[in-house]
Image (cartoon, rainbow, N blue to C red):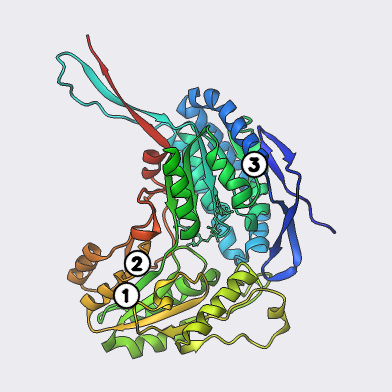
Amino acid sequence: MTPAVLADLVAGAFRPAGGSTVASVNPSDESDVVALVPEGTAASARAAADAAAEASGTWRSLAGPARGEHLYNWAGAIGQRADELARAMTREVGKPIVESRGEVARAVVILRYYAGEAVRAVGEVIPSQAPGALQFTLREPLGVVALITPWNFPLAIPLWKAAPALAFGNTVVLKPSEMSAQVASLLAETAVAAKLPPGVFNVVHGTGPNVGTPLLEHSAVRGISFTGSSAVGAQVAALAARRNVRFQTEMGGKNVLIVARDADLDAAASLAASGAMRYAGQKCTATSRVVVVREVAAEFLARLRAQVERLPLGPVDDPAAAVGPVISARSRDSIATALRDAQPERLFGGELPNDARFARGYFVAPLVIRLADPDAPLAQRELFGPVLGVFEAEDLDHAIDLANRTPFGLSASLFTRDIRSALQYVRRIEVGLVRVNGDTTGVDPHAPFGGMKGSSSGSREQGPAAREFYTETKTVQINP
Ligand code: NAD
């Protein structure tokens, strides 16, 4: 059966985008075409932004609780199709089904959380110099916001942007990744089923150059939230700065797990293995480096090996698979090229089993390598695959120096039982998400999320931080 060509959601109705298409394929089996995705045009981007602009006045004047009610209804519509959404996600982006189910559940939580937040567009009262005057701040929506999202969390990322944007009175145009467009289409269907007012949430399919750029250049767009690679993030930031439009860019990472000499080595090995290998290392917060203090390195590595070997690689229609494929042939090949060029010392793993199932998809066998030069490309670049690099450090101080020595600053964890070590690390580590005795992955939807240095433009998503981004402050002084 020929897969359907996806349609854009504009002003509450599905519209064919026309033009040429690209295939979104199942990364476990590339012969399985999931959907045909329009490459899109400047006209389709314009139509979606126009619809969002048209809906803006009514939506922003709706009372917060009423907007919250819409988000609750949307959460319900997603809950009703949870199984279908999880299966579609697993098929389209190669996420093991247990994790896809987790992401759908999280999507519901995000919408419920922001349904409550819709009443909290709070300002503050600030005593005035003017005698008798009442001075306060008001928070107002930006207007139309454009959301550009990657494929790796195809429900959670669009929603952790769209839910606060809508809660605080903005209207939205989402441009999802071409590689997760089927899931975005299902998300659009749930918005229609939940009876979100037409034009409040629009979805426009297409490539970055065809649709992303014209969308971001549309004069109605007053806010841009982007998640994706650092290279594209830099272009988005330049465009937004030129237009003087508020923006946030959340980008790559080279996340680190540090093992101190007093660490619980079993716990550290287990979370390093799952953080590095689950979902084939394609979470932005995946553990891609371990820095272990030399004294315990041999013991730790033996445990790490056992833990990695407990995570089977396989096509994601196999429920036992913990590590699925990477997203594309391009991604698989770029990981292979980086390894071939660097010729790192292999500690263990990296051999694809001789099994016909692996010939159909984009599989990379979990691999653990030794890192020696902190400035080498493998220690600096995000690979976005199931490859973990291990450094040995003299002591904790040296470990933190090595941990900080990348252009990125998204997430880190330290395993220790010593409060002074934990405090020293919390103060010195240059990342936005700091864990002690935990994994580098996973976030609470009600806690601020984002990176430092090259991982982010510096603002935060989720939790109350999202309110800062999606509202503008007016300072009001009323004199007697
Ligand atoms: P990508 O940068 O290739 O694409 C992201 C989005 O940008 C897609 O929708 C794409 O179509 C669009 N795009 C591409 N060129 C564009 C242009 N010129 N103008 C406007 N839009 C354009 O990233 P990806 O491969 O989809 O995602 C993987 C990357 O995302 C990794 O680097 C990962 O670390 C990062 N990521 C970061 C976070 C975070 O919160 N920090 C979360 C998830 C993923």
Q: Ligand 1 closer than 8 Å to the CB at disc 1?
A: no
- Pick the front one: 336 or 303: 336
Q: How far, Cα to Cα, is label 2 from label 3?
A: 40 Å
Q: What is the quadrant of residue 436 in the picture?
A: bottom left
Residue 322 visible to an observer of this rendering: no
Dot 2 and dot 1 residues touching (CB under 8 Å): yes
Q: What amino acid does circle 1 point to?
A: Ile
Residue on which the image places disc 3: 42
Q: Position of residue 414 (x, y in %)?
A: 30, 71
Dot 2 and dot 3 residues touching (CB under 8 Å): no
- Pick the front one: 347 or 324: 347
Left or right of 413, for residue 160: right
Residue 412 disc label:
2
Name the residue at 75% across, 62% down. Answer: 33
- Mark 2 residue element: strand
- Mark 1 residue element: strand
Q: In this picture, is 96 found above or below 235?
A: below
From the image, which quarter does the N terminus lie in? bottom right
Q: What is the quadrant of residue 95 in the picture?
A: bottom right
Residue on which the image places disc 1: 258
Toward the right, the furthest residue is 1
Q: In this picture, is 69 found above or below 238?
A: above
Circle nearer the N terminus (3, 1): 3
Q: What amino acid does circle 2 point to?
A: Ala
Q: How far, Cα to Cα, is label 3 from label 1?
A: 47 Å
- Mark 3 residue element: helix
Circle nearer the N terminus (2, 3): 3
Q: Position of residue 451 (x, y in %)?
A: 37, 57
Disc 1 packing (10 Å; few <14; some 14–19; many ≥20):
many
Circle nearer the N terminus (2, 1): 1
